[in-house]
Amino acid sequence: MMRIPFMFNRRQVVMVMLSAAALATSCIKPPTAASYKLVWKDDFDGPTGQQPEASRWKYDVGTDWGNAQLEYDTARPENVSLDGQGHLAITARKETYLGQQYTSGRINTNGLFSQNGGRFEARMRLPAGRGMWPAFWLLGANISSVPWPGCGEIDIMEARGQEPTAVIGSMHGPGYSGGAALTKKYVQPANLSEDFHVYAVEWSPKVVTWSIDGYVYETIAKDSLPTGTTWVFDHPFFIILNLAVGGNFVGAPDGTTVFPQNLLVDYVRVYSKD
């Protein structure tokens, strides 16, 4: 089984759960788009079944990236391709494939695009159902020389399919990874599998903020890290998009989970400070 060198063992996270009512009084709008310059994007335009541009994305092919996941991630269009309507579809299927009972997809920009700071955003419609684990995240581009968690990780969006109104943002670094990751869950009224929403982080030298549809629900500053730990968000990171099936974070699908399930991505955009 082929493994990608930068993969690592992650965690079950202890969540901080905030109500939508509480957040309504504390959320603020992020800086306006005028303060940023668009430097990289993918709008996923193309015919049905076309795979994402090789100049922008690579595939991670394999299974169980250290999280007890149940899918085999492939480079097949059945699992990763355009839907012909301006979206990328990462599709989880229930099928026997190379010893696993499910297939799905995982793509990244390692070696093709990375950036230190700025705004990273994606407009997505999430899957639903127990055992679905979609993610939009960043990983330190120095992973080959500085193993995780020293390279750093920013989870812009993670979700559990059995919690269709919740979105999770996290940060991992040395001394605050795995079960000690800096993590917050935002619970809102909308079912995130029924419509598209914009998930973003804005990352400056000393602070990272997380937002959904322009409303900030989490902020982590350099000076707020646990005592004795190190801020490692001072170098380029690359992008990862994936839809996992099962694993420690979400548990296995059950009889209520309907397949196939899609993570639909309308666009990914990256901005730098103008």
Image: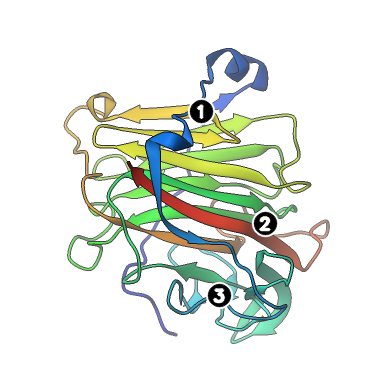
Answer with the quarter of the image where residue 214 lies. Answer: top right
Viewer-nearest of discs 2 and 3: 3
- Residue at the image point whose x is 50% and y is 47% from the top: 121
- Please tell me which residue lies in front, 226 or 237: 237
Q: Is residue 252 visible?
A: no
Q: Amino acid under label 1?
A: Val
Do the numbered discs 1 and 2 sit on residues whose CB atoms are within 8 Å? Answer: no
Circle 2: element type:
loop
Viewer-nearest of discs 1 and 2: 1
Q: Is residue 160 above or below residue 218?
A: below
Q: State which tag comes first along the sequence, 3 or 1.
A: 3
Residue at the spot of label 2:
131
Quadrant of the rendering where the C terminus is positioned = top left
Q: Amino acid under label 2?
A: Gly
- Residue at the image point whose x is 62% and y is 17% from the top: 24
Circle 1: element type:
strand
In the rendered image, residue 138, in percent from the top left (x then y), is placed at 39, 54
In the rendered image, residue 4, in percent from the top left (x then y), is placed at 37, 75
Q: Which mark is residue 216?
A: 1
In the image, taking residue 226 as reference, residue 228 lies left or right, namely left
Residue at the spot of label 3:
52
- Residue at the image point whose x is 59% and y is 87% from the top: 98
- Residue at the image point whose x is 70% and y is 47% from the top: 196
Spatial CA distance of label 2 from label 3 is 25 Å
